Amino acid sequence: MRVGIDARFYGSVGKGLGRYTEKLIHHLESLADSQDEFFIFLKKENFEEYAPKSEFFHKVLADYPWYGFSEQIGFPFLLRRYSLDLVHFPHFNVPILYFAPFVVTIHDLILLRYPTIRSTTRTAWLYHLKFLAYRLIIASAVHRARSIITVSYFTKTDIEKEYPSSEGKVVVAYEGSELHENGRKDGARDRSAASHEKEKSGILSPYFLYVGNAYPHKNLELFIPLAQKFPHIRFVLVGKEDFFYRRLQARVVESGVGNILFVGYKTDTEIEALYKGAVGYIFPSLYEGFGLPPLEAMRFGTPVIASSRGALPEILGDAALLADPARVEDFARHVDALSQDAGFRQAQGERGRIHAEKFTWRGMAVKILAYYREALKK
């Protein structure tokens, strides 16, 4: 079969979507057989980031901006030139003018469930126009897809509830939890790396960690009253500075809280060191289709305190300490327990590490490759 993958989000430029696309392609290269041929469509900014390791994988320049008119008009013409049997769009932005067989990954329905002007930097009228276009494009993708791949049974149910016509073609493939393909086992080296990263970032122990963006549904304002309850503990937030992080920083300054530390963007290796040095990882999100960052934290033995909403109870199970994201007291109780009881902290970290190992990127790719073959039989 000839399969195209829309990899314009590939790598660091696409954040979470970029990691998903990168890991999928990496493992498909070792899983696909000689009768399969894959065409990987990339933007100019990530074209050199991907180097095919299989002779059956080819990269193609598709420099069409996300969510733009050229994506809707020009990209379909480029795809048709390669006579593809199937295209996988790892995000909902499927060109309306692409009529050949495709599968789409829909990670969540956050923009439908939390359609708030607070989640955009645009003017109100432009936001509402963009929101209308989003609804049209995702509905079109759901209606026309051979299969809809999603990342949790929570999101599967959410999609089927919102789009009844999708029932019967929504399938689930859990994401993986590995931050790196081969984790180190050298305890002394890990402690040294964690100490170095803390020193470089100006972090004083003890600290709790958050890694991710600062979109409104992430509920990061909860860190302000939480930090006020524990002035002797640092709360370290890792994420590339943008409008939403700057707005959160302004609110922290206004509150007078001095123990919330913003350290900006970090590489995977630096994040790994921060995970291993943290007392715990906090994830207070109001809605998640999967919940990759807390699962990654578990992989490194970091105890996790997470929201009890969305897909998080399904994905994290009893390996995390769950809390109501509307109640800072629930999070405070778990912060106190982890910071005071070293035995409990160690046991919780080990429980999470064992749980996270059930989620692998290779396992996800195996399922998705099977979904490709099933989609072509429809």
Image (cartoon, rainbow, N blue to C red):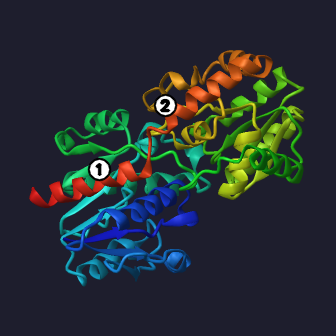
Asked which secondary structure carries label 2, the reply is helix
Residue at 19% across, 68% down: 99
Q: Are marks 2 and 1 in contact (CB under 8 Å)?
A: no
Label 1 SS: helix
Residue for badge 1: 367
* Residue 348 in the image: above or below residue 74: above
**Any part of residue 218 in sight:** yes
Tally the numbered discs. 2
Q: Position of residue 80 (x, y in %)?
A: 23, 79
Kind of residue sitting beneath label 1: Lys
Left of 376 or right of it: where is 204?
right
Task: Quadrant for the C terminus, please.
Answer: bottom left
Q: Is residue 241 visible?
A: no
Q: Foreground: 302 or 6? A: 302
Disc on the earlier residue, 2 or 1: 2
Q: Quadrant of residue 375?
A: bottom left
Q: Please, is residue 98 above or below residue 374 in the view?
A: below
Q: Residue at x 39, y 54 (%)?
A: 134
Where is residue 342 drawn, in percent x and y? Answer: 76, 21
| Residue 64 horizontal side relative to residue 377, left or right | right
- Compared with 323, 37 (above or below) is below
Picture quadrant of residue 377:
bottom left
Query: Label 2 belongs to which residue?
Result: 312
Choose between 204 and 361: the one closer to the eye.
361
Mark 2 closeness class: few <14, some 14–19, many ≥20 residues within 10 Å = many
Q: Nearer the viewer, residue 128 or 295?
A: 295
Whole-percent x, y for residue 155 in the image: 36, 37
